[in-house]
Every structure is written in structure tokens, then in C-alpha cells.
Amino acid sequence: MDAMNLWLPFSFSSATEAILFGIAYFGWLGSEIIGSVILPRLRQRRLGVKLVRKDRGSALVVNTGLMAAIFVAFTFSLMKIALLPEWVFYPGIALMVGGIVLRQWSIAVLGRFFSVQVSIQEGQTIVRRGPYRYIRHPSYTGTLLTLIGVGLAVWSWGALLVLLLVSGIVYGYRIPVEERALVAQIGEEYIAYRETTKMLIPFLL
């Protein structure tokens, strides 16, 4: 291990790449803490919103699964397992940033109806603005883009595969839980909305 890799947490070839990745990665974590947790809770408290939890443990499944997958991805990078060419680093960073922007935009558009845990509110309605015109779960799409970016930025197709596989499993559990709760609360209107939009990828999925 050379002198640089004594302090770089992943097997990047330069300090510039490590700094860029650090900015993107810790920017992502910061946006999750502030934009996905703190601000929604403050907004709901200010508006006096009462949440009825319908989570069925899905938030725990998502958080635990994704943290484990990221740990494996970083290990693959550090151990130089299943490497990709170095040029994929910058597209990876771009996808990370794009995914962060999409997720935070989606959360902002959803407003008081956003919650980290699957919850319903009195008077909950369908939001059709912004990315919700085309897909029902754009915040998850944003996370998936960020995770794809992580896999590319750490130069490992093995890491990318693990991140995609675990994401498929955890969101494969989370999304049906969320949609059942919305159907139970909103009814036929949500069923109609579900039939005219895609789940994660416009026009495809």
C-alpha cells in the first residue's frame, strides 16, 4: 500500500479524486440528515401534522440494507476487487450529484407529505407536480442514481452489482408497503394514478 492509500479510505489514484468523492459522498449524507429528516420533521411540527405509521419495518430494512451494501462496496474498492476502468469515476460523481438533486427536489415537492417512514396523514392527497408527473417514487430513483454513481466512482463493477442487488431487494419490500398504505388512504384516485405513471423510471419501470 503506497503512502497515499495510508490516508485515502478507498483505492483512488489521486487526492483530487478522493476529495471530489468525499464532497459528493458526505454531501449526500448531509442532505439526507437535513433535507430528509430534520426539515420534514420541523415542517410537520410547525403545521401540526399527525402521522399514522404504516411502515411495517421498511425504513429499517432500507437503511440497514443500504448501509451494508455501501460497506461492501467500499471494501471492494479498498481491496481492488472487480475493478472498472478509472475513467468511470467522473460519470459516477455526476450520477451521485444528479441523484442527490433529484431526491431533494422530490422531497421538497412532496412537502408535508414526505416522511422517512411510511406514514399517512389526514387529508393526504396525490402530488402530481414536478417529477411526480412521470413517476410515483422519484426520491427512490434519486437514491438509486446516487448508488449507481457510488459504484462507478469507486471503480468496481462488483460494488455496483452489490449496490443494485441490495437496492432491488430493499425497495422491492418498501414500495409495496408504501403503495398499499396510499391505496388504503386515498383509494381509487391513487389506483388511477398508479395506472398512468411508472414506478421509478419514466416510460419504462
Image (cartoon, rainbow, N blue to C red):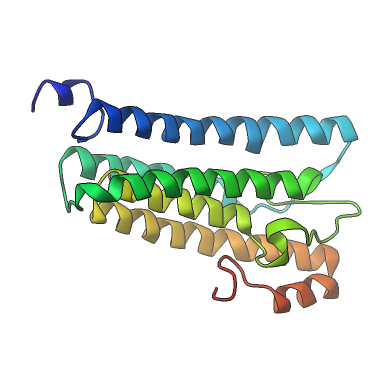
Residue 80 on image: x %, y %: 15, 44
Residue 151 shown left or right of residue 169 in the figure: left
Residue in the image at 29% along x and 28% along y:
16
Q: Position of residue 159 (x, y in %)?
A: 28, 51
Q: Farthest residue toward the left?
A: 1
Residue drawn where x is 39% and y is 49% of the image = 149
Q: Could you tell me residue 21's position as x and y percent? A: 36, 34
Residue 132 drawn above or below residue 65: below
Q: Quadrant of the N terminus?
A: top left
Question: Where residue 84 appears, x then y in whole percent?
Answer: 20, 53
Q: Residue at x 39, y 53 (%)?
A: 148
Closer to the camera, 176 or 26?
26
Q: Which of the 4 image quadrants contains residue 11?
A: top left
Judging depth in this view, the residue of 159 and 104 nearest the camera is: 104
Q: Residue at x 44, y 50 (%)?
A: 95
Q: Is residue 46 left or right of residue 151?
A: right
- Image mark count: 0
